Image (tube, rainbow, N blue to C red):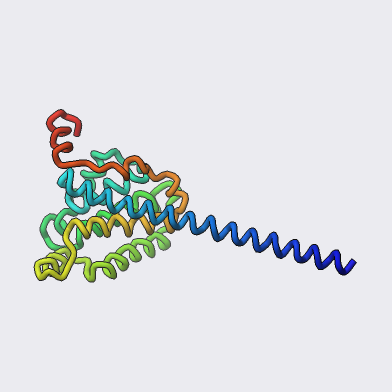
Amino acid sequence: MLSLSKHLLLGDFVLLRAFYLFQWVENMKNQENISRIVDLVGQRAANIYTARSYCCSEAVIVVINQGFRGDLSPEMAVRLGSGFCHGMGGAGCACGALAGAEVALSLFLGPRQPGGMKGKEFEKVAKEMHDRFRARFSATCCRVLLKRRKEKNGATCKELTVGGAEIAAGLMLEQRPELAAKADLDFLAVRESKLGTLAKKLLGGE
């Protein structure tokens, strides 16, 4: 009887260990998938910034909205970002890449969004967006970032755009991992050219 109990306990231990191993493997796969999506978001943001001549805030909002199948049309998404370009119209205040990222987070996680986070919880995520951006680029103010770039000690606007998009995507997927399944990988994998975008405009396609 004692021997049988030992075998049962050993069997339970083996099953439990196998379960945790399976969970670990699945978690690693999910982390790899999330990292891949975040990388694609950053690359697509850079592509849109260059090919469409969008400013930082416009590119970030467009890529997050369309990349995760948001509610806004591409036209509405780019319009929403226009007021934040160049540190709010050249005022040199908050970097447009950061402002656009905060807007993008609001579209998916904000308390006014169906299924969104509670107000206080979302405020923590919004602050985390700010803090991660500052940690990555050493500043959040457009005029400071531009000064650092002129001194050859800071990021370009394109690099700030990539960073804003990547940080926003990462935070979204941390809070709502199920959004990974909604990611439009086809859209994120596309690489437009300036010439192709110009031709599309001339033909009335944009």
The C terminus - image quarter: top left
- Residue 201 placement (x, y as % from top left): 15, 34
Name the residue located 28 percent from the left edge and 70 percent from the top edge.
Answer: 135
> Residue 193 falls in which quadrant of the image?
top left
Report if residue 160 is visible in the image.
yes
Name the residue located 31 percent from the left edge and 66 percent from the top edge.
Answer: 132
- Residue 98 placement (x, y as % from top left): 25, 59
Q: Is residue 141 shown above or below 48?
A: below
- Residue 149 placement (x, y as % from top left): 13, 66
Identify the residue at the far right of this view.
1
Report if residue 117 is visible in the image.
no
Name the residue located 43 percent from the left edge and 49 percent from the top edge.
Answer: 180
Q: Is residue 1 left or right of residue 91?
A: right
**28 and 187: which is toward the camera:** 28
Name the residue located 12 percent from the left edge and 69 percent from the top edge.
Answer: 152
The N terminus - image quarter: bottom right
Q: Is residue 115 left or right of residue 199?
A: right
Identify the residue at the far top of this view.
203
> Residue 139 falls in which quadrant of the image?
bottom left
> Residue 125 falls in which quadrant of the image?
bottom left
Q: Is residue 198 left or right of residue 61?
A: left
- Residue 48 placement (x, y as % from top left): 22, 46
Query: Number of marks in the image?
Result: 0
